[in-house]
């Protein structure tokens, strides 16, 4: 008898920079429990990364670092399939086929393509244009139901649905139609220096963003300099007190305390005490992650075994979809 199918989650992560506190609290931390109810695939998308120029040695290092950091954040490689995109050739193979079911005009309308073309005017390559089709292949190969992504990727998931529906319209039910997925509300972490913007590694002010691998003293410095307001009371008010509310959000996640508890803890104590307290809580939350990631980075054999096994499992699932697609479009089976 066939096993009952659990819903599938697929997400891709570009190995293009350091993981931030925002991505830990807003995404990765919530992914850990998903493995109980879903079949989860987390793909380190090195093929997407080369749509902008990369230094090869840096790309290699960051790909492995990212894997180590995900495991250190609690993503169990036994319960989740974590793998490197270029290790599963089916992604490139399906992307080619899907190219022939994607319109030039559709790709030209993608806002990320327009943004990136403006930023990389000297290198508007075909890969940058075609990026969303490779992403569609990533998602559709695994028959994903849910795709946890930030707002900037919603349009790409929409396009994935359009491509899948177009293909299904011609050949019958080949692809499951995926949806974007926002696990929980609330945990959207903002920049420490401009709390009206999301915490981001592309923040121009380095103090606005915290990285999970950052040294405790650097983390403390950023929190002590965090932007607040002209009052002195620690009170949750995300409209008028954006900076303080963001710090309360972070402190709440790091300590498990409710906003009411935090408000009474800091009654009459002012920001001068609150800000370093948040910094310390974050340092303590990240300490075990940083230590574990550092330990894992020294264990190359283990990391290798994780990405090899991940690629093997992923390739097995991907091959089933790819074979079906190849047959539908009229390729001769090998
Ligand atoms: N484009 C995504 C980003 O930059 C990364 C990505 C690639 C992705 N393939 C994916 C995300 C598939 C979700 C599903 O964030």
Image (cartoon, helix red, strand yellow):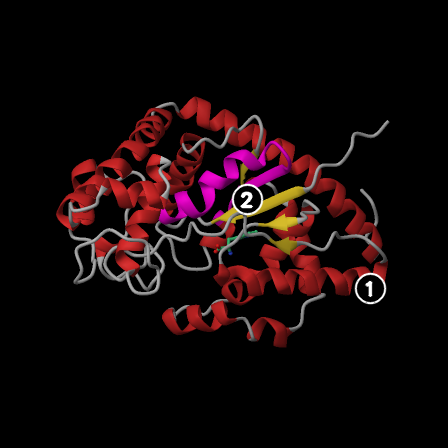
Decide which of 123, 111 is in the foreground and name it: 111
Q: In the rendered view, does 119 fall on the left or right side of 94?
A: left
Name the residue at 45% across, 23% down: 302
Residue 18 appears in the picture as rendered? no
- Whether the residue carrying mark 2 lies under 8 Å from ligand 1 is answered with yes
| Left or right: 253 in relation to 243 | right
Q: Which residues are magenta?
A: 19-46
Image quadrant in which you'd find residue 239 = bottom left
Q: What's the residue at 34%, 38% (across, down)?
A: 254
The percent position of residue 54, horizontal first and vertical second, equals 38, 53
- Frontmost of labels 1 and 2 is 1
Residue 169 disc label? 1
Q: Is residue 256 visible?
A: yes
The quadrant the C terminus occupies is top right
Residue 145 location in percent, x, y?
68, 48
Residue visible at 24% across and 40% down in the picture: 265
The kind of secondary structure element at disc 2 is helix
Q: Which mark is residue 85?
A: 2
Q: State which tag comes first along the sequence, 1 or 2.
A: 2
Q: Position of residue 307 (x, y in %)?
A: 52, 32
């Amino acid at each position: 008898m066939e096993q009952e199918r659990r819903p599938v989650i697929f997400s891709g992560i570009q190995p293009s920079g350091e993981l931030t506190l925002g991505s830990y609290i807003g995404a990765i931390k919530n992914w850990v429990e998903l493995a109980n109810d879903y079949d989860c695939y987390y793909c380190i998308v090195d093929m997407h990364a080369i749509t902008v120029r990369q230094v090869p040695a840096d790309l290699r290092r960051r790909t492995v670092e990212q894997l180590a950091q995900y495991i250190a954040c609690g993503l169990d490689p036994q319960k989740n399939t974590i793998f490197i995109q270029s290790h599963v050739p089916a992604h490139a193979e399906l992307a080619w086929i899907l190219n022939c079911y994607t319109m030039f005009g559709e790709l030209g309308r993608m806002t990320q393509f327009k943004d990136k073309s403006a930023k990389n005017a000297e290198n508007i390559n075909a890969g940058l244009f075609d990026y969303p089709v490779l992403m569609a292949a990533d998602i559709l190969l695994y028959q994903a139901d849910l795709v946890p992504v930030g707002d900037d990727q919603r349009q790409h998931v929409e396009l994935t649905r359009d491509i899948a529906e177009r293909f299904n319209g011609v050949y019958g039910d080949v692809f499951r139609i995926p949806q974007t997925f926002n696990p929980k509300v609330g945990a959207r972490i903002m920049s420490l220096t401009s709390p009206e913007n999301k915490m981001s590694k592309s923040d121009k002010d380095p103090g606005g963003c915290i990285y999970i691998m950052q040294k405790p003293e650097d983390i403390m410095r950023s929190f002590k300099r965090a932007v607040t307001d002209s009052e002195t009371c620690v009170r949750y008010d995300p409209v008028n007190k954006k900076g303080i509310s963001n710090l309360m959000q972070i402190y709440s996640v790091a300590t498990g305390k409710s906003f009411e508890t935090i408000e009474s803890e800091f009654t009459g104590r002012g920001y001068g005490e609150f800000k370093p307290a948040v910094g310390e809580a974050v340092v303590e939350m990240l300490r075990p992650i940083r230590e574990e990631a550092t330990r894992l980075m020294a264990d190359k054999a283990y990391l290798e075994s994780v990405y090899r096994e991940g690629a093997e499992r992923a390739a097995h699932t991907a091959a089933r979809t790819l074979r079906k697609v190849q047959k539908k479009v009229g390729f001769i089976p090998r």
